[in-house]
């Protein structure tokens, strides 16, 4: 269970982006959060993924209260999340080949020995060939890079996935392909997901339920 | 049909790369665009759509080689010199609604100052009327007057897009070129932006809408051109394309079926690299209908460039 309890967050303590928002995801549930651009839904997603410290409120991850944010988050909580952002270009280190991009989380948690097995398996799963995995971000398209970013998010087998506008930059076919990869992973792992976006048709098709931002901040 | 606003014939763009390789970004594109018409050019990222737009504006980098023609009135946009393009074409005869407005706007000046400059240069507005003219111009693109004194970094994506649209509309150009004008906008804003563009087209202008957003294309386009691996593989009336007849090219059909409101199934595989396009049909490797005929590049006949197009052939195919 992922519980956001009375979360107030923003970038200026005097003027938070939103106040006292509650959202609960049942184990294995996928929730689509719909809202217009600039409403604060990405900030909420960042809080949920331990990437942004809220001004007030509690985040409870599978019964355990979050004890820190960003690099201060304890590893077992941090690695419970896989995150995919909207803009793959801004979320990929331009110096790394795609294969190193995908391997980085494994190396960061001291599991380098598994790189040789897991990375090719994930590459195949997201549809990236050996040739593409050897390239650096500027040598691939947005869609290909986003495939690598999704593989990176899955490599530690997170219990929760946070997808912040994962497909906003992508064409219809790549969107469908990535959503299928996410759903396949969720089916076999039982992971839950928070997908943030503004495409109502997509999120309604993709998620178990959708929540509108207005309902969250009003309630 | 009257004289088209834009007539593109056999347009190809290749980039010469280091090491003697070539990137074929656009191959043999041919289409016309009439006054009052909106043509949506759709395709996935990296298929060459934006290069086509750059070619029409004479904004290709040095290492590009072009062939074919793109006539805007009696000016060939591919061979016109920089002076002609800069003084009479860009902004005046072709208005560009850019892909990333944040990069298109000058970061160190307010929206008002950029609008006023454009009005001064393109519309010759001078003196005290300038302020009001800027506000009117902003209004046309639904840019709120209260935000005119902001700098681009202080604007949300949607507002920056509208600022860029306002700038593109100032020159009253007969051809509007919108390159992914809706990337990153939410659905309501997408609808509003494209409706707005459509409205600006009116009766006497033409709009080339380059997008990967099929819903946006469906909303406003009269005709749809589908681009795959540098080639236009299908051109069809939007009603047929999105309606019961459906696309004829298997790629276009797959793209449409990938939509969440349809089957939501991806096309297997990925598009080929533009540096190493196959000899024959570029889609054959991903196509369930492919056979030996696909070893040669199919010509664009009857609206689709395919050896095995889906049935329901149009009785009077449009060129």
Image: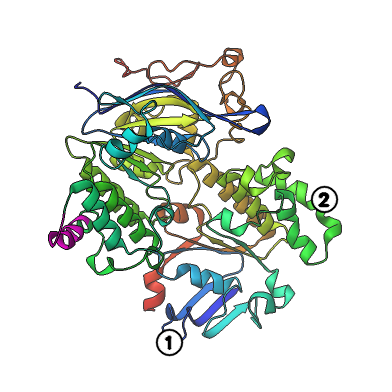
Residue A10's place in the image compared with B139, above or below, is below
Badge 1 is on which residue?
A14
| Pick the front one: B254 or B209 | B209
Q: Is residue B256 visible?
A: no
Q: How many marks?
A: 2
Q: State the separation of the CA atoms marked 2 and 1.
A: 49 Å
Predominant secondary structure, magenta span: helix
Is mark 2 in CB contact (under 8 Å) with mark 1? Answer: no
Q: Nearer the viewer, mark 2 or mark 1?
A: 1
Q: Is residue B286 left or right of residue B32?
A: right
In this view, the residue farthest toward the front is B83
Q: Is residue B140 visible?
A: yes
**Residue B233 location (% of width, % of height):** 45, 25
| Residue at (38, 72) in percent of width and height | A215
Q: Which residues are magenta?
A: B126-137
**Residue A58 location (% of width, % of height):** 56, 83
Q: Secondary structure at mark 1?
A: loop
Badge 2 is on which residue?
A117
Q: Secondary structure at mark 2?
A: helix
Query: Are there few (<14), some (14-19), or many (20+) residues within 10 Å of tag 1?
Result: few
Q: Is residue B176 magenta?
A: no
């Amino acid at each position: 269970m992922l519980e956001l309890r009375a979360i107030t967050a923003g970038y200026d303590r005097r003027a938070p982006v939103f106040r006292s928002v509650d959202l609960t995801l049942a184990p294995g549930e996928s929730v689509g959060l719909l809202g217009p651009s600039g409403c604060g839904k990405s900030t909420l997603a960042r809080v949920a993924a331990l990437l942004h410290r809220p001004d007030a409120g509690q985040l409870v991850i599978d019964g355990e209260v979050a004890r820190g944010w960003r690099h201060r988050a304890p590893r077992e909580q941090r690695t419970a999340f896989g995150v995919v952002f909207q803009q793959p270009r801004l979320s990929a280190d331009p110096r790394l080949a795609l294969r190193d991009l995908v391997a980085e989380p494994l190396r960061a948690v001291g599991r380098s020995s598994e790189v040789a097995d897991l990375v090719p398996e994930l590459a195949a799963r997201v549809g990236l060939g050996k040739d593409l995995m050897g390239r650096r971000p500027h040598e691939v398209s947005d869609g290909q890079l986003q495939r690598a970013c999704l593989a990176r998010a899955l490599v530690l087998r997170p219990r929760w996935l946070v997808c912040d506008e994962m497909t906003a930059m992508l064409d219809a076919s790549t969107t469908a392909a990535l959503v299928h990869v996410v759903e396949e992973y969720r089916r076999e792992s039982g992971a839950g997901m928070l997908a943030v976006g503004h495409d109502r048709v997509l999120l309604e098709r993709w998620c178990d339920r959708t929540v509108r931002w207005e309902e969250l901040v009003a309630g | 049909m009257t004289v088209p606003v834009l007539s593109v014939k056999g347009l190809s763009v290749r980039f010469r790369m280091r090491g003697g390789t070539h990137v074929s970004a656009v191959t043999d594109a041919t289409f016309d665009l009439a006054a009052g018409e909106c043509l949506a050019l759709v395709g996935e990222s990296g298929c060459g759509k934006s290069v086509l737009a750059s070619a029409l504006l004479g904004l290709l980098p040095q290492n590009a080689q072009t062939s074919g023609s793109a006539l805007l009135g009696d000016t060939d946009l591919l061979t016109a010199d920089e002076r002609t393009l800069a003084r009479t074409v860009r902004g005046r005869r072709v208005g560009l609604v850019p892909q990333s407005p944040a990069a298109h706007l000058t970061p160190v000046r307010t929206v008002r100052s950029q609008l006023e400059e454009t009005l001064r240069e393109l519309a010759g507005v001078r003196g005290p009327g300038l302020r009001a003219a800027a506000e009117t111009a902003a209004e046309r693109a639904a840019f709120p007057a209260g935000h005119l004194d902001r700098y681009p970094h202080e604007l949300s994506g949607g507002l920056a897009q509208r600022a860029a649209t306002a700038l593109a509309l100032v020159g009253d150009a007969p051809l509007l070129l919108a390159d992914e004008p809706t990337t990153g906008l939410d659905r309501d804003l997408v609808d509003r932006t494209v409706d707005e563009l459509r409205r600006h087209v009116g009766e006497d202008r033409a709009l080339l809408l380059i997008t990967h957003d099929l819903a946006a294309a469906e909303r406003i386009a009269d005709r749809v051109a589908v681009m795959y691996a540098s080639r236009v593989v299908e051109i069809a009336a939007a009603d047929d394309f999105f309606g019961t007849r459906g696309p004829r090219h298997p790629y276009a059909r797959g793209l449409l079926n990938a939509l969440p409101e349809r089957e939501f199934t991806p096309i297997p595989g990925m598009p080929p690299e533009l540096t190493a396009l196959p000899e024959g049909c570029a889609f054959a490797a991903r196509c369930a209908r492919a056979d030996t005929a696909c070893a040669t590049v199919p010509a664009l006949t009857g609206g689709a460039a395919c050896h095995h197009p889906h049935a329901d052939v149009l009785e009077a195919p449009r060129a």
